[in-house]
Image (cartoon, grey):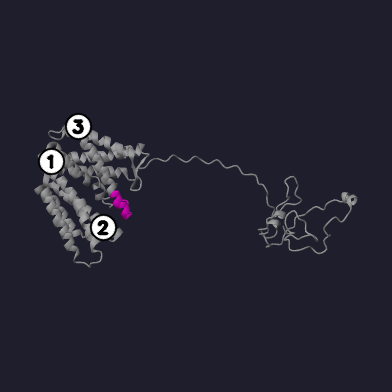
Amino acid sequence: MNDHSWGAPPQTGYWGPNDQGPVQGAAPAGPAYDAPEAQQTRPMPIVPEVPAYGGDQDDDRGAARLSGPLFRDESPQAQPYDIQQAPPYQPVQQNPEPMPDAPQPAPPPQKKSAGRDLGAAIGVGVGLGAVILASLFVVKAVFVGVVAVAVVVGLWELTSRLQERKGIKAPLVPLALGGAAMVVAGYVRGAEGAWVAMALTALAVLVWRMTEPPEGYLKDVTAGVFAAFYVPFLATFVAMMLTAEDGPWRVLTFLLLTVVSDTGAYAVGWRFGSHKLAPRISPGKTREGLLGAVTFAMVAGALCMQFLIDEGTWWQGLLLGLAVAASATLGDLGESMIKRDLGIKDMGTLLPGHGGIMDRLDSLLPTAPVVWLLLVLFVGSG
């Protein structure tokens, strides 16, 4: 330990505030008086030295001298000053009493929000339902035309978002023409016609893209073939359901079960949902919502198979409802995955309160082949 450490008095003189040397003229250190005289002397009071403005503030010992007595039972001789302020110095309160916090008003309770304009969504849904039912039970060909129009609009939304967000140019013209032809072929020629139209549409996409530079050819045609399968090909199963003798009732059952499944998932999940189903894909979906979808769809399936489908039974409806709830949920998650990859909330803005056409087809498209297949297995092709 050197001579400047705490507890070791300096050998000569009195050290200044910054310990840079003895002060000239100071009394020499050590016992200058004998014991009797030392008992009669009084120690000089230590007055804290106020340093000049702008002095060295990084010296710990200087800071200790400015902060007051070293021991708590000592009374300070003078109030310390805030050396950060310009002269004149203002006294600094050592231990200011904490001010009582003002009472804060309780925040108003937040209500759960659906995230969309519920009134507009209901109005648009009722309007679409009226158009579908009118075309379905009046003239079957009109309903096929409605499906074809929905397919073309859905393809336009999907290819537009791919180009805007990813720079992928899936050729819309061959997709739109081939998609509409695919729906008609499925209605007229069944599954065989749908597969032939699908193959020709994919070939048309490959050839059409050759008219542009080769850069990005592979990703463009891959996206085009994917769009042809995802939208029009899956929609052809709705047209194939319509070909049966009780075709309109099969299509109505398919639509009702899908809508009831989505509604059950929304209602139960919004009210009781607390456990996330797939937070990385769709944070709003919960396991409770999935149970609601299954319950609602199974009940609706039993009723539809018992009263709407010829030769159908309630237990077949339970299985059908379970399958619809699973396929509708997977379809919804699949499009949520696409939209998350694209960085968008909705595929379009055509339907107020719903988004775009593709935002309504997300659960319908993958459910169509499931319902078609199970109805064929349960009651035949009609």
Label for residue 334?
A: none
Question: As drawn, is 209 to the left or to the right of 337?
Answer: left
The magenta-colored residue range is 335-345
The residue under label 3 is: 315
**Residues under labels 3 and 1: Cα distance?**
21 Å
Label for residue 160?
A: 2
- At 21% from the left edge and 39% from the top edge, which residue is drawn? 256
Circles 3 and 1 in contact, beta carbons < 8 Å: no
Q: Where is 117 relative to 178, above or below?
A: above
Q: Quadrant of residue 319?
A: top left
The residue type indicated by label 1 comes to Gly
For the residue pair 116 and 13, the one nearer the viewer reads as 13
- Mark 1 lies on a secondary structure that is helix
Q: In the rendered structure, does residue 50 fall within the stretch colored magenta?
A: no
Depth check, mark 2 against mark 3: the one in front is: 3
Q: Quadrant of residue 205?
A: bottom left
The residue under label 1 is: 247
